[in-house]
Image: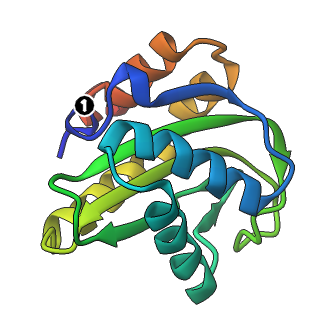
Amino acid sequence: MDLGDLISPESVIPTLKAKSKKQVLQELSSHAARLTKLPERDIFDTLLQRERLGSTGVGHGVAIPHGKLATLDRITGLFARLDTPIDFEAIDDQPVDLIFLLLAPESAGADHLKALARISRLLREPSAVEKLRGSKDSTTMFAVLTETATSHAA
């Protein structure tokens, strides 16, 4: 699965300002609502419900909040680099500054899991994470996010 199918340059936020996990989820929900044309409250509630099951902070400053929405027609992603790292209750207790939001239709099934796996692989790649943290503009971040997996291995 190619991340270019999930995100667009408009879905990359180079400097998101937020002071808490809840505020991050609210800001991401607002951006996602503009991209998907779905109600912001539905997106926020879905993300909050998922976080109650356990934090989507996967460690090393990365979080991958995700959820399924019945009214969504395709898998959609959004990437943000936080202006200041925040506590996301991550598994390693480290603050989070890179967040990849993934929303999927309830019918997505295996494609949702494949997308999560692809995002997770990319955000475990030290060179990609370093480039994302060092970038200040959405164009560069989008390029890093959409490079093929083979170019990371090279």
Tell which residue pokes out farthest to the bottom in this image.
53
Q: Quadrant of the C terminus?
A: top left
Residue position for label 1: 4
State how the image is colored. Answer: rainbow
The amino acid marked with disc number 1 is Gly
In this rendering, would 152 be left or right of 13? left
Q: Where residue 3 appears, x then y in whole percent?
A: 28, 38
Local SS, label 1: helix
The percent position of residue 10, horizontal first and vertical second, equals 41, 23
What residue do we see at 60% from left, 65% from top? 58
As drawn, 5 above or below 110: above
Q: Nearer the viewer, residue 145 or 44?
A: 44
Query: Foreground residue, 34 or 118?
Result: 34
For residue 14, above or below residue 66: above
Name the residue nearer the viewer: 78 or 153.
Answer: 78
Residue 136 lies, in percent from the top left, at 66, 14
